Image (cartoon, rainbow, N blue to C red):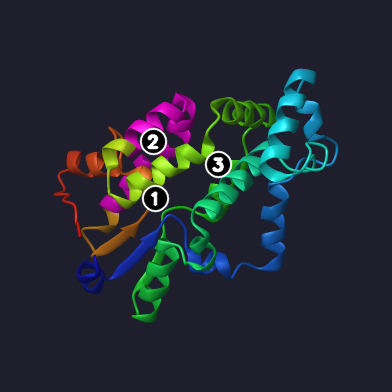
Amino acid sequence: LMKAFDKVDNIIGEINMIGFSEMSPERMQKMQAMMMMPADTSLLSLFNEEETAKVNDWLKNQMGASLEMLSVMKPMTIMVTVQNKILMEMMPELATMTSIDKYMQTLGQRKGKTIGELETADYQMELLYGNSLEEQADALLEMIDHGDSKGLLQQLTDAYKSQDLDTLWEIFQEQMTGYEYDAIVKVRNLNWEKQMKELLPQQTTLFVVGAGHLPGEYGMINLLRESGYKVKPVRK
């Protein structure tokens, strides 16, 4: 990987992580507002009595907080917060680690390479938190009904560390609805492929994206191969 890194002109991630970390306080405030419920709507209003009890019990178990205490958060914000909490419990070292995409971009900047992005942070925030509140509430209930979130994240982590794309793909197929896959993976991958095909003939580039974008029919590996590129893995 580092041999390839030294040869490329550009380092391009999903978003420009360096620019994201240097975001203005006003823009950061705007993005944080996207994670919160509208002022005239309460999280409690999204669930019936039975669902409220279920979510309340789950939150007390996961977060030590009641639904009422977290009622200003969007359902997706709660889901992301719980998943991050579980990840930190599984791997406490994450708290002091730099993400791979930011690491590669920062190193690239030091070495005078061009840093770019395939999409904006605003687009990603809209993708994550822009769904209707009802859809987010349904996703939260589905997460609760699925049960063992820690076990699932452990499977994903093990598959990632062992570079097992087949297992990653199986887990994604089990966990994502067709709508979620289209929005989160397929549409974005097709857009990224278009950008890659425009840039690659001009300059050598290292693209750093999440592992979930690699496998499957609309994964980046298959899309690039179908476009005539030779794609081969680099393993330890």
- Marks 2 and 3: CB-CB under 8 Å? no
- The residue depicted at 27 percent of the width and 37 percent of the height is 166
Q: Quadrant of the C terminus?
A: bottom left
Residue range corresponding to the magenta coloring: 168-197
Which quarter of the picture shows residue 53?
top right
Regarding mark 2 in the picture, which secondary structure is present there?
Answer: helix
x%, y% of residue 38?
79, 40
Regarding mark 3 in the picture, which secondary structure is present there?
Answer: helix
State the CA–CA distance, disc 2 to disc 3: 13 Å
- Looking at the image, tell me whether mark 2 or mark 3 is earlier in sequence order: 3
Q: As displayed, is residue 108 above or below residue 203?
A: below
Give the labeled residue for mark 2: 186
Q: As displayed, is residue 99 above or below residue 67?
A: below
- Within 10 angstroms of label 3, few (less than 14), some, or many (20 or more) residues? few
State the CA–CA distance, disc 1 to disc 3: 15 Å
Which quarter of the picture shows residue 83?
top right
x%, y% of residue 202?
23, 63
x%, y% of residue 31?
66, 54
Give the labeled residue for mark 1: 210
Q: Is residue 172 highlighted in magenta?
A: yes
Please identify the residue farthest to the right as the structure is shown.
40
